[in-house]
Image (cartoon, helix red, strand yellow):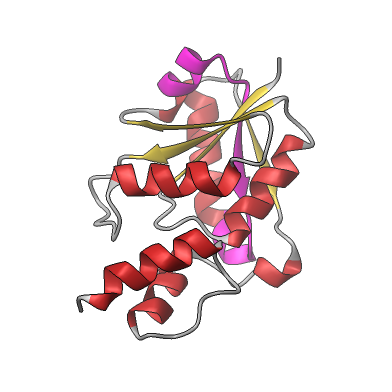
Amino acid sequence: MRTAIYPGTFDPITNGHIDIIQRALKLFDKVIITVARNSVKDPLFSEEERLAMIKEAVRHLKGVEVDSFDGLLVSYARRKKATAFVRGLRAISDFEYELQMALMNRKLNEDLVTVFLMPNEKYTYLNSSIVREIARHRGNVSKFVPPHVLRELKKKFAHM
């Protein structure tokens, strides 16, 4: 079984993320979407909230597992018997950071490959930070996230 890991913060999951997951499922038998516990970032949603939103967003897709991890991604991949990482590239500006991460992961475990996937062009400008910022200012993000994520964003920002 060919297993890939799609790591990220997913704060929140967007239609662009879902597009990448669907593309990855054409290449791999199983895709593990994993929420990275990143001490540097201060997410809007808790880990539990993000996991729940992701599970709801992908429940119609076969071959998807949702999880979280702490520590080195290559160690997590070894435990999950994964052979690849999936990363989305929206623009050339994403590439430099993603290349550094891919090369470092290869240095740590040369058996793991990183597969870069480009989303549908309608999602090339989309990221979770932009979605949060628009939602924070009561802008319409309904075209960027699944309906259940939209509801969660509205709840989060109703108190602000």
Question: Residue 5 is drawn in which quadrant?
Answer: top right
Question: Residue 129 is drawn in which quadrant?
Answer: bottom left
Left or right, residue 92 beside residue 107: right
Q: Is residue 84 magenta?
A: yes
Left or right, residue 45 beside residue 7: left
Q: Nearer the viewer, residue 108 or 75?
A: 75
> What residue appears at the point 31 percent right and 69 percent down from the top-left corner?
155
Q: Is residue 54 magenta?
A: no
Residue lying furthest left: 159
Question: Residue 68 is drawn in which quadrant?
Answer: top left
> What residue appears at the point 41 percent right and 44 percent down from the top-left corner?
52
Left or right, residue 2 beside residue 67: right
> What residue appears at the point 71 percent right and 45 percent down from the top-left corner?
22
Q: In the image, residue 74 lies at what x, y percent?
A: 46, 24
Q: Is residue 20 above or below residue 160?
A: above
Residue lying furthest right: 26
Q: In the image, residue 53 lies at what x, y percent?
A: 44, 50
Quadrant in which the N terminus is drawn: top right
Q: In the image, residue 69 lies at what x, y percent?
A: 36, 30
Q: How many numbered tags mark residues here?
A: 0
Q: Is residue 67 above or below residue 55?
A: above
Quadrant in which the C terminus is drawn: bottom left
State which region is magenta.
75-95
> What residue appears at the point 49 percent right and 55 percent down from the top-left corner?
13
Q: In the image, residue 103 lies at what x, y percent?
A: 54, 36
